[in-house]
């Protein structure tokens, strides 16, 4: 088995990935704000970015300054970065889900998607609590020079199940709106491809779960950093790609009929016409 990343290599990953993810998210928020289109999905993306920045700061302190901290501070840093990781991942998923919600019809479609969003929140809360009861049931890890809780099999299984199911939902959710929208074949393929990028997060999360289940240590930390930042970047792709597509062509506007008024979908946003 390879020795794994060094502390210096882990620090590089810890700085580079969150900065890239934050730049992409800030660009997404700029794109939405300049067109007065900020909505709930953007708020979740902003929350994910804040969690990711906090994760970066806590990881930097955890990796570099642990020698100078009292033991309680080391443990607090570990718990904070562990929970910030979940914050980034699930806020990113909620951002993607609410991007679909804003495109959905009022009525049954939106009610289903909002129920799924509530379920995502419940799952996040359970995973949040699982870290506490797993780590506090065996507190001997707190005496280590660099405290790191052995999360073990149960946490790894919970992460695998929730990550895979959550990403499957995000891949399938757009089909609720695509089949009723007036789209060309190329546009349908483009919508599906953009939202299917959630599969990238699944691949990264499975790698992270493997390291949680087996070796832990810095390999687990690096995998968590990758999963957090990739999740946030993927959550922004539909908006960022739309911005560049709009620069290249003006034919990305589609219309669909509804019971009253008319609705125009500009790939990645929805505009209600009076």
Image: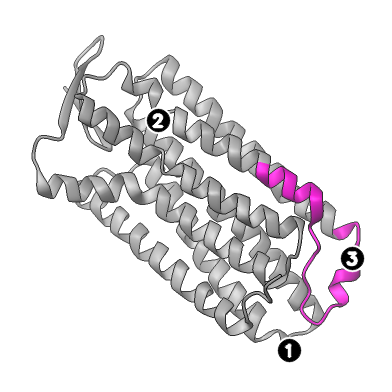
Q: In this figure, which residue is indicated by the disc labeled 2?
A: 101
Q: Left or right: 221 with respect to 111?
A: right
Q: Left or right: 99 with respect to 76?
A: left
Label 2 and label 1: CA atoms lie apart by 47 Å
Image x and y of residue 142, in percent: 85, 72
Label 2 Cα crowd, 10 Å radius (few <14 / some 14-19 / many 20+): many
- Furthest residue in direction front, as rendered: 1
Label 1 Cα crowd, 10 Å radius (few <14 / some 14-19 / many 20+): few
* Up-down relation of residue 27 to residue 127 (above or below): below
Q: Main secondary structure of the magenta part?
A: helix
Residue 67, labelled with which disc? 1
In magenta stretch: residue 137: yes
Q: Residue at x 63, y 57 (%)?
A: 208
Q: Left or right: 44 with respect to 4?
A: left
Colour treatment of the image: one colour
Looking at the rendering, in which quadrant would you find the N terminus? bottom right
Image x and y of residue 157, in percent: 74, 44
Q: In this figure, which residue is indicated by the disc labeled 3?
A: 139
Label 3 Cα crowd, 10 Å radius (few <14 / some 14-19 / many 20+): few
Q: Left or right: 39 with respect to 7?
A: left
Label 3 and label 1: CA atoms lie apart by 20 Å
Image x and y of residue 15, in percent: 48, 75
Viewer-proximal residue among 254 and 153: 153
Q: Which residues are magenta?
A: 136-160
* Up-down relation of residue 61 to residue 227 (above or below): below
């Amino acid at each position: 088995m390879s020795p794994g990343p060094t502390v210096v290599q882990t620090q590089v990953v810890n700085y580079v990935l969150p900065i890239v993810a934050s730049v992409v998210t800030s660009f997404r928020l700029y794109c939405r704000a300049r067109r007065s289109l900020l909505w709930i999905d953007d708020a979740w993306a902003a929350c994910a970015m804040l969690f990711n920045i906090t994760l970066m700061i806590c990881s930097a302190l955890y990796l570099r300054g642990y020698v100078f901290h009292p033991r309680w501070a080391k443990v607090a840093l570990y718990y904070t970065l562990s929970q910030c990781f979940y914050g980034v991942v699930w806020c990113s998923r909620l951002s993607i889900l609410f991007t679909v919600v804003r495109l959905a019809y009022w009525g049954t479609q939106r009610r289903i998607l909002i129920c799924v969003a509530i379920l995502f929140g419940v799952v996040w809360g359970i995973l949040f609590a699982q870290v506490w009861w797993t780590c506090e049931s065996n507190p001997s890890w707190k005496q280590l020079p660099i405290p790191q809780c052995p999360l073990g099999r149960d946490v790894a299984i919970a992460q695998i199940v929730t990550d895979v199911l959550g990403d499957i939902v995000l891949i399938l959710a757009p089909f609720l709106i695509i089949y009723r929208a007036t789209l060309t074949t190329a546009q349908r393929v483009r919508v599906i491809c953009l939202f299917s990028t959630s599969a990238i997060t699944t691949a990264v999360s499975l790698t992270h779960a493997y390291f949680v289940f087996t070796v832990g240590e810095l390999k687990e930390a690096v995998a968590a950093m990758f999963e957090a930042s990739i999740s946030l970047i993927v959550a922004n792709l539909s908006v960022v790609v739309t911005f560049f597509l709009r620069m290249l062509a003006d034919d990305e506007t589609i219309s669909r009929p509804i019971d009253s008024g008319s609705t125009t979908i500009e790939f990645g946003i929805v505009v209600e016409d009076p």
